[in-house]
Every structure is written in structure tokens, then in C-alpha cells.
């Protein structure tokens, strides 16, 4: 009987170990020289459960060197040939220059929602590029993508 319970317990534990997840999070670094207008950051949200949907958020890490109050991003996501494109205005600072988000010292991070209940899987792609009215922006240190289950 003891062996039977150990076997059943082992099956439950192994069944809980799955390569599929209900969340994805990854950051890509931006070179110190800046983020050129034409550079697109690509993400492949691998390992997500294809049967469920998730909420998509974009996070930005920046330094005090960023010279603007906001950051305009174009976020394209989905599966070829059908992609959806959203424009996101991230307010990084208030009218007095105080940074929003969390930070310690000269580094700050802010996350904003992009879309909810989006079905992404291993063949999905997410592309992020800035659409500011300058060629190269400085002070952005990394850009991240988070996909979480809607609970």
C-alpha cells in the first residue's frame, strides 16, 4: 500500500512538471550608443501554453540620460500572416521631470499593458520599435516583454 501511494504521488509530481508555462518574460539590452530609429527588437514567446491567452505588457528600463518625458513605441504581435499593431505612449516622467516607475539610483523601470487576452504560441512573434521623432534615442538601457495569464 505504501508503494502504491508513492507511485501515485510520483505520477502527480511528474505530471505537474511541464515544459509549457502560463507566463513569459524577457529583456533585450540596448547599446550604450543608443537605439536607432530603424532597429526593431524581436521576441519569440516560447514555452507558452497555446491553448490559453495572456496579457501582454512592455517594460522599459532607462537612465537619467533619457532626455524626454515619454517614449512612443510600436508593438507588433501575432502569427504570420496576421499581425496586430499597437502604438503605445509610455509616460516616463511627469511635467516636473520626476520619473515614473520603480528605480534605484540612476536606473528606472516602468511597465505598461499593451493588449489583453492575446493568444501567443511558439510560432508567434513580437516586434518592438521606437517611433520617436529623432533618429537615435539615448538613455534607454533595455526593453522587455511580459506575457502573463489573466488569472
Image (tube, rainbow, N blue to C red):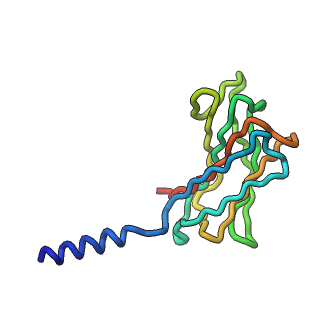
Residue at horizontal 73 percent and vertical 72 percent from the top: 80
Is residue 98 placed above or below 45 in the rendered structure?
Answer: above
Quarter of the figure with residue 8: bottom left
Q: Residue at x 70, y 28 (%)?
A: 64
Residue 106 picture quarter: top right
Relative image position of residue 109 (x, y in whole percent): 61, 38
Does residue 79 sit above or below 95 in this rendering? below
- Residue 110 against residue 51 in the figure, above or below: above
- Image position, residue 66 (x, y; %): 75, 32
Of residues 31 and 77, the one drawn nearer to the viewer in this rendering: 31
Considering the image in quadrants, where does the N terminus appear? bottom left
Number of numbered discs on residues: 0
Q: Residue furthest top?
A: 96
Q: Name the quadrant containing residue 40.
A: bottom right
Q: Residue at x 80, y 52 (%)?
A: 39
Return the x and y of residue 63 as percentages of the image width and height: 68, 32
Looking at this view, is 78 or 150 the one in front?
Answer: 78
Left/right of residue 60 with respect to residue 134 in the rendered view: left
Q: Which residue occupies the extreme left position in the image?
A: 1
Amino acid at each position: 500500500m505504501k508503494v502504491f501511494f508513492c507511485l501515485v504521488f510520483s505520477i502527480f509530481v511528474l505530471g505537474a512538471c511541464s515544459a509549457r508555462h502560463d507566463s513569459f518574460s524577457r529583456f533585450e539590452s540596448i547599446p550604450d550608443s543608443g537605439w536607432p530609429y530603424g532597429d526593431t527588437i524581436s521576441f519569440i514567446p516560447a514555452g507558452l501554453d497555446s491553448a490559453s491567452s495572456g496579457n501582454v505588457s512592455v517594460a522599459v528600463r532607462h537612465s537619467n540620460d533619457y532626455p524626454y518625458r515619454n517614449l512612443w513605441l510600436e508593438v507588433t504581435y501575432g502569427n504570420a500572416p496576421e499581425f496586430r499593431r499597437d502604438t503605445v505612449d509610455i509616460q516616463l516622467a511627469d511635467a516636473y521631470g520626476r520619473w515614473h516607475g520603480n528605480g534605484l539610483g540612476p536606473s528606472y523601470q516602468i511597465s505598461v499593458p499593451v493588449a489583453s487576452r492575446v493568444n501567443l504560441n511558439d510560432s508567434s512573434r513580437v516586434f518592438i520599435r521606437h517611433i520617436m521623432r529623432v533618429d537615435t534615442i539615448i538613455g534607454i538601457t533595455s526593453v522587455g516583454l511580459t506575457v502573463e495569464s489573466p488569472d
